[in-house]
Every structure is written in structure tokens, then in C-alpha cells.
Amino acid sequence: MNRRQSQSFLGTPATAPGPQGPDMLRDFLLIRSNPLAFLEKSWRTYGDIVQFPIPKPPTYLVNSPAGVRQVLVSHGRNYGKSTIQYRALSLVTGEGLLTADNDNWRKRRPMIQPAFHQALFAELSTITQGVAESLAIEWEKVPAGAVCDVDQFMLTAALDVVGQFLFGTDLSSNAHVITEATLEALEVVIARARVPIAPPGWVPTANNRKLNRSVAALDAAVEAMVSGQRLRRVIRNQVDGEIENPRNMIELLSSTTDPLGKTLTMHEIRDEIVTFIVAGHETVASALSWSWAILADNPGLQDQLAAEAQQAEESDNGASVDSLPLTRAFFEEVLRVYPPAWLITRKALGPDTIDGHEIPAGALIILSPALLHQHPDVWPNANKFDAKRFLREYSRESYIPFGAGLRQCIGKDFAYIEGVLLLAQLTRQFAVRYPAGARMPVGEPMVTIRPRGGVRVLISARAH
Ligand code: HEM
């Protein structure tokens, strides 16, 4: 292993080994086309803590199991989210939970947490099952021998689940305007935030205009939707004469209060709604698409999942993740090998020492669940996909598809319910396989790791 350590980068002392300027230039194309492959190369070449030759801010990759825990958990308060990645995202999501820096976040998370209370999970299961049923109807219509991109189906399904959960049955035109404007604005942001080690410079004005247009559309649509729902709730309450439980996430966010009784403002609600759309659909869709990509190569595993799902359907209508242990373990392994959120960044608020390396205040810290999940110290046969790995006893310390510590994903249970129930419903009714000559797609690390070219498979109904 090459552990070359340089002296300094434009006055910033080097405190960990890493590539030099010419090495970065040589890898320029790799950095742009596949930043994850570049980070992996850096880790395998220089070790668990790598410093890149960037003076402002000093930039480190941390991939030791202890170092990652230190940044996210034990010293979590020393690391904030004011990084290029989250600043770019906040152009769309505002100060929502995902991008809020620590102080704002501390006030906000306890207010939002009740919206993810277990009491809502029954509703989520019902929504997911409804979406799976609609998807099954679509899949039944696919002509025999036609090749379909299941990635597109998964994106639509995940957006549908999150949309129904947020907006309830109120699928008025506003709901569509909100989701479409969010996705449009996100496109611009992706271009800006692709890689923290290669920050894009000038953003074309056309893109800026597009961003402003979609953010304005978003603001107006959310405001109309929230006001409408609030009004309807007041009318319902007046008619029924009593305060009824909120029916969906918007109603919940509108009525949530902090310990002093303060409710979220319209602007804060808007930021959270957009955050849930952004954080809550492509991530789940990506995990589901990789699930199909793996299953298409494993007919035996598909049969096992189908049998488990059939049994669960007969015993409890297939509505509970607990009755689907193999499907859940499989989905967990998908999240280990293809963690959708492959990049997590932090800014060091004060100095720290990680694995003996001094980290200056202001440093940018890059973590990657995709790389930690390959670490040989914690994962036996890390590069082997083992669908039953998570049926065995496992230390979860270095399993971070949802992050860890204070800022762990608030939608983790949501994602398991949605992912596992959708997979179970569909594997029970359908089998997928690659057409002759086709292979597993390769990963493309965008905001999430996407299957390049989609997941193009043949779908056939199972005989029961
Ligand atoms: C497989 C699906 C998902 C994956 C892999 C995932 C991954 C993550 C990760 C890694 C973080 C932490 C980021 C960091 O520490 O910088 C995070 C945070 C977050 N996620 Fe998820 N997520 C998923 C699904 C969801 C869903 C379904 C929702 C909402 C409906 C959601 C909402 C959020 C929010 C609001 C945060 C910020 C939490 C906070 O800082 O308090 N995520 N997610």
C-alpha cells in the first residue's frame, strides 16, 4: 500500500497520506465520471484516512470503522452539515431536516419525529400495498417477451408512496405540480453538487432560471395545498364538533408543536415536504431497482422470496415486515452492497484527531457507506452478495445505509416497510429474468447509485 504523505498544500499542512496534484490530474476523468470509483481507489491506495491535495477546505476521506463512528456518533456534535453537497441541496429543500445545520436541526427533529410515529405505519403499509397492486396490474399488461425497465416502475411507485403518505388521498393537480417542480429543481442541483472533491464552477444562467422557476412553482403549490388542507380540516372539525386525528403528513406537520406550543410556519412546512419528496423516493427506488437487478440473475432466490411472501399472504395478508424475514434480510444486503446514499459529507466544526491524524477545524470530511460496507475488518467476504447474511447475528456498527448517530435517517423504518412489502407483493406474483445476452447493469453514482441504462428485464406472471 502506498502511504505517501505530502508536506503541505498551499500552506495547509498534510496530516494524512493521499494523492498529489499530478495524481488528481491524471484521475480527472475518473473523478468526473465515477467519483465513487475514485474514492475507492484512493482508499485502497492510501489507507483508511486519505487527505486530498485541496487547501480550502482541507479535504479528507475517512473509511476506518472507528473513524466513521467517531464522525457520525461519538463526536457527532463536532461535525456539521455546512458542506458543498448540502448547501447545493438546500437551494431546493431550504432548511429542511436533511440539510439543516445542527442548531436548527436540534429544534426541528423532535417536532417532525411524531410524523414518523409507528401509529402511521399501518397507513403506510396500506398505501404501499395499494401501490403494489396498481403496479401488478401494469405488469400483467406487459406483453410476453417485451423487455421492460423496472427502474422506471420503481421510481414511479416510490414517488406514489411518498406522495400519498404526504398528501393523503388529496391527489389534486397541486400534488403533481409539487412533485414535478421538486424533481426539476433537483436536476439543476445535481449538476452543482455532484462531487465535493470536484466542485462544479460556473452554473449556466438557463439552469439558474430553471431553478428559480421550479422553486417558485413549488412554493405556490405547497402553500395552496397546505392552506386548502388546513381549511378543510377546520370545516370538518366544525361539522364533526371535535378535533380529529390528522389524516396525512401535511396535516400532521401543520398541527405539530414544539414544547412551547409553537407550530411550524408555512415556509418550514414547505421545506419539510420538499425534503421528504427528495430524500424519500429516489433512495427507495434505487434500492428496489438493484433488488430486481440481482433477482433477475437468481431464479432460485426469487422462488424462495415468492414462497415466503405467499406464506405471509396466507397468514397475515402479507402486511407485516416481521413475517418476511428473508425478504428483509435480502433488502438489507442490497442496501449494504448498493447503498443508495453512497456519499455523506460533514464539516469539522472544531479540530479533532481521527485514527491518529489531526483534522483541522473547517475540514471537509467525506464518508461513504459504499466503501465502509466493503471494509474487510468488519465484513467477511465483503464483495460477495449474500442474501442470507443478515439472517445471522451481525454487529450493525459498521452498517450505515441510513447514516448513524444524531442525524440518522428519519425514514429508515418507512424505507424498510415500503421496500420489503413492495418486493414481497411483486415477487409473489411475478418472476423476472434478463433477456438473452443481457447482464446486471453497472452502478452510476449520481445523488444515489443508479443502475446505468436501467434494469431491463422480462417479466412473467407466476403460476399459483
Ligand atoms: C432506502 C432508502 C433510504 C436511504 C438509503 C436513506 C439514507 C439516508 C441517509 C444516509 C441519511 C443521513 C445523511 C447524513 O447523515 O448526512 C438520511 C437522512 C434523512 N432521510 Fe433518508 N434514506 C432513505 C429513505 C428515506 C425516506 C423514505 C425518507 C422520508 C420519507 C427519508 C428522509 C430523510 C430525512 C428527513 C433525513 C434527515 C434526517 C435528520 O438529519 O434528522 N429518507 N437518509
Image (cartoon, rainbow, N blue to C red):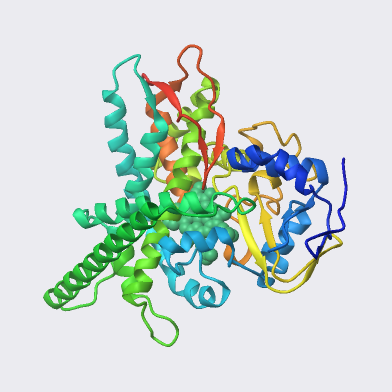
Q: Residue at x 45, y 48 (%)?
A: 417
Which image quadrant for residue 10? bottom right
Describe residue 349's horizontal placement relative to residue 86 as left or right.
right
Judging depth in this view, the residue of 397 and 118 nearest the camera is: 397
Q: Is residue 78 visible?
A: yes
Q: Residue at x 46, y 29 (%)?
A: 453
Measured as percent of width and height from the top left, residue 159 is found at 35, 47
Quadrant of the snapshot with the C terminus: top left
Which image quadrant for residue 51? bottom right
Q: Residue at x 77, y 69 (%)?
A: 360
Count the numbered circles shown.
Answer: 0
Judging depth in this view, the residue of 48 and 217 nearest the camera is: 217
Residue most extreme to the left: 239
Quadrant of the snapshot with the N terminus: top right
Q: Residue at x 69, y 63 (%)?
A: 56
Above or below residue 104? Residue 373 is above
Describe residue 157's horizontal placement relative to residue 105 as left or right.
left
Above or below residue 224? Residue 427 is above
Measured as percent of width and height from the top left, residue 303 is found at 49, 24
Describe residue 413's horizontal placement relative to residue 225 as left or right.
right
Measured as percent of width and height from the top left, residue 52 is found at 74, 53
Above or below residue 93? Residue 256 is below
Describe residue 90's horizontal placement relative to residue 350 as left or right.
left
Measured as percent of width and height from the top left, residue 440 is found at 54, 24
Q: Is residue 410 visible?
A: no
